[in-house]
Image (cartoon, grey):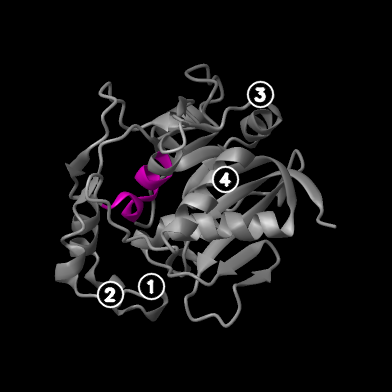
C-alpha cells in the first residue's frame, strides 16, 4: 500500500545547477504541511526508470532545457507510482527564494483549482493556432555547449534546433511556480504518453507545443477543457517577497531570482 500524502513540492532542476542553485536556494525542510519536497534531475543513461537518493530523484530522461516538459511529466508519473497523492503537485523552479510561511498557507488552502499560476499569455481568441516563437531557438543559439553534454541527450544539430519555432498561441501560466491538481496531473500523463514522451511531437495546426514546458502544460490541459486560473504564486521583484511589511500581494509565495542562468 502506497503512503498517503496531500501533495508534492516538485523542484525541477538539472545537473548543471547541483552546486549552485540547489545549494543556495534549498528549502529549509523536506516537508511542509505534509507535502513532501522532491528535487528532480534527468539522466537518459540510467539503466532503471529512476534513482532515488533522499529527496533527490533522478529520472531516466534527458537533462536539457528543451526536455523540461518530459522531465516534469515523467517525474509526476513516478511520484504517483510511489505515493497516493490526494491533492496535487506544486511545480517549482530551482532558483526561488521562498516565504515559507506563505508557502504553507497556500498548501493548506482549501478548494484549489486544477491549474493555478501567473497567467503569461492572456488571449481572447478561442481559436488556438500556432505562433512564430523564437524562445527555444534563441536559447540554444546562446547555449551551444548544451549540445555536447551527454546528459542532455541532444542527438541533433544546432540548425535543427533553430527550426523549433512554432508553438500554440494559447493561454498558459508562467512555469516557475504552478499548481497542478491530481486531475490535471493525470491528464498530463495521459496526453504526453500519447506522444510517446516526445517533446518534439508536431501538430500541423499547433506546431511544437511541448518544446516549452509552460506552453505544453497549458496546451495539454486546454485539450481537456481546463484553463488556467490566475494566481500570482511568485514575483520577479525582490522587494515584493522580502519586505517585512509585505502587503503588495498576498498570493506571492516566492521570489524568482533567475540566478546562474
Q: For the magenta stretch, what is the residue range?
A: 208-218
Residue 65 in sight: yes
**Residue 76 percent across, percent down from the top left:** 59, 54
Helix, strand or loop at label 4? It is helix
Helix, strand or loop at label 3? It is loop
Q: Nearer the viewer, mark 4 or mark 3?
A: 4
Label 2 sits on residue? 147
**Residue 211 percent across, percent down from the top left:** 32, 55
Q: Is residue 96 left or right of residue 51?
A: left
Whichever of labels 4 and 2 marks the residue nearer the N terminus, that label is 2
Q: How many marks?
A: 4
Whichever of labels 2 and 1 marks the residue nearer the N terminus, that label is 2
Mark identifier at residue 185: 4
Q: Are marks 2 and 3 in contact (CB under 8 Å)?
A: no
Q: Residue shown at 45%/57% (left/top)?
A: 194
**Residue 13 percent across, percent down from the top left:** 49, 59
| Prevailing secondary structure of the magenta residues | helix
Whichever of labels 2 and 3 marks the residue nearer the N terminus, that label is 3
Q: Is residue 152 left or right of residue 85?
A: left
Label 1 sits on residue? 152
Q: Residue shown at 53%/24% (left/top)?
A: 251
Whichever of labels 4 and 1 marks the residue nearer the N terminus, that label is 1
Q: Residues under labels 2 and 1: Cα distance?
A: 7 Å
Instruction: Say which of 19 and 53 sits in front.
Output: 53
Amino acid at each position: 500500500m502506497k503512503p498517503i500524502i496531500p501533495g508534492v513540492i516538485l523542484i525541477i532542476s538539472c545537473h548543471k545547477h547541483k552546486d549552485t542553485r540547489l545549494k543556495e536556494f534549498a528549502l529549509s525542510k523536506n516537508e511542509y504541511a505534509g507535502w513532501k519536497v522532491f528535487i528532480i534531475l534527468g539522466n537518459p543513461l540510467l539503466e532503471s526508470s529512476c534513482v532515488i537518493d533522499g529527496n533527490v530523484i533522478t529520472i531516466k530522461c534527458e537533462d536539457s532545457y528543451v526536455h523540461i516538459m518530459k522531465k516534469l511529466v515523467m517525474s509526476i508519473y513516478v511520484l504517483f507510482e510511489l505515493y497516493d497523492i490526494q491533492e496535487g503537485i506544486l511545480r517549482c523552479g530551482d532558483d526561488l527564494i521562498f516565504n515559507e510561511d506563505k508557502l504553507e498557507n497556500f498548501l493548506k488552502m482549501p478548494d484549489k483549482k486544477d491549474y493555478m499560476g501567473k497567467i503569461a499569455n492572456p488571449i481572447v481568441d478561442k481559436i488556438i493556432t500556432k505562433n512564430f516563437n523564437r524562445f527555444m531557438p534563441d536559447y540554444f543559439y546562446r547555449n551551444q555547449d548544451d549540445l555536447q553534454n551527454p546528459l542532455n541527450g541532444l542527438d541533433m544539430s544546432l540548425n535543427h534546433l533553430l527550426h523549433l519555432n512554432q508553438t500554440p498561441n494559447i493561454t498558459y501560466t508562467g512555469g516557475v511556480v504552478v499548481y497542478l491538481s491530481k486531475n490535471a496531473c493525470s491528464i498530463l500523463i495521459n496526453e504526453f504518453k500519447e506522444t510517446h514522451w516526445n517533446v518534439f511531437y508536431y501538430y500541423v495546426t499547433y506546431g511544437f507545443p511541448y518544446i516549452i514546458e509552460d506552453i505544453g502544460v497549458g496546451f495539454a490541459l486546454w485539450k481537456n477543457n481546463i484553463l488556467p486560473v490566475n494566481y500570482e504564486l511568485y514575483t520577479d521583484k525582490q522587494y515584493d517577497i522580502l519586505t517585512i511589511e509585505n502587503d503588495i500581494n498576498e498570493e506571492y509565495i516566492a521570489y524568482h531570482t533567475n540566478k546562474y542562468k
